[in-house]
Amino acid sequence: MPISVTSVRKGHWTLPSQVSYGAYMAANEGRHRLGPSGGRLTLRTYRSGLAAQAGHDLTIEITRWSGELDGDDGAPDRLGTRIELGSLVVREGTGGLKPLSDRDRREIAASALKQLQADRYPEATFSASQFVPDDRGGGTINGTLTLHGQSRPLALVVTRNGDGHYRAAATVIQSEFGIKPYSGMFGALKLRDAVDVEVDIDLSAASRD
């Protein structure tokens, strides 16, 4: 799902009294260009149903995406990311009666694109409206996710994992966007409605303008 994020006014970035703009973004001023060379975007899906043991919990990677993070005077004021749905690749399947073959992975990816109607909706957008830092160098990014032609609020929870390393995580409910989760074996094997999204970023590896 291609994601792009529009500009955000600095007045919407609220800081706890013990955190300064400089402490949060001191090493991250300027424009950072994000992408697979300095980050990873993954989706995690989970099985359910009476025949859940026959299926797999999947780790899916989006391999083509790009983004920009702007900071000015120690404060972030714009975040933009674009993701190509057609670039999803099944990386891992845990559980199941047998390991996934390469053919299985390709067929699962094709099925996922069909469920997403990626030919009709090749992109998704996320527009940030508010940044709320915490006292550990992370925080929450609130905004609106548009996926499958529908828009819903979404909160990204950001954690700092080291100097310049961040993880943003959220849970997307497919049915809220008009997407019907996968169901097989006459409904005995299902994909859970909730899909976990994780974005790992190394800002030290991102190019700057």
Image (cartoon, helix red, strand yellow):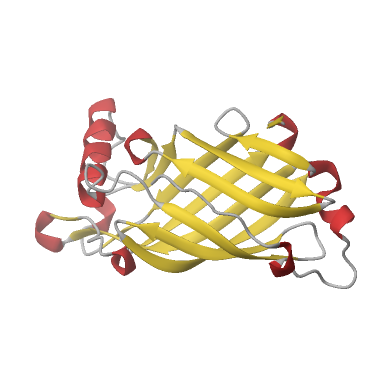
- Residue sitting at x 61%, y 41%: 68
Q: Position of residue 146 (x, y in %)?
A: 39, 59
- Residue sitting at x 45%, y 32%: 64
Q: Position of residue 63 (x, y in %)?
A: 44, 32
- Residue sitting at x 25%, y 40%: 108
Q: Position of residue 84 (x, y in %)?
A: 39, 38
Horizontally, is 147 left or right of 203 in the view?
left
Q: Nearer the viewer, residue 156 or 185?
A: 156
Residue extending furthest toward the bottom: 17
Q: How many marks?
A: 0
Image quadrant in which the C terminus is located = top right
Q: Nearer the viewer, residue 107 or 143?
A: 143
Q: Position of residue 65 (x, y in %)?
A: 48, 36
Horizontally, is 43 left or right of 24 in the view?
left
- Residue sitting at x 41%, y 68%: 152
Horizontally, is 82 left or right of 167 in the view?
left
Above or below, 13 relative to 84: below
Q: Nearer the viewer, residue 100 or 10?
A: 10
Q: Nearer the viewer, residue 204 or 13?
A: 13
Above or below, 125 relative to 152: above
Horizontally, is 26 left or right of 8 in the view?
right
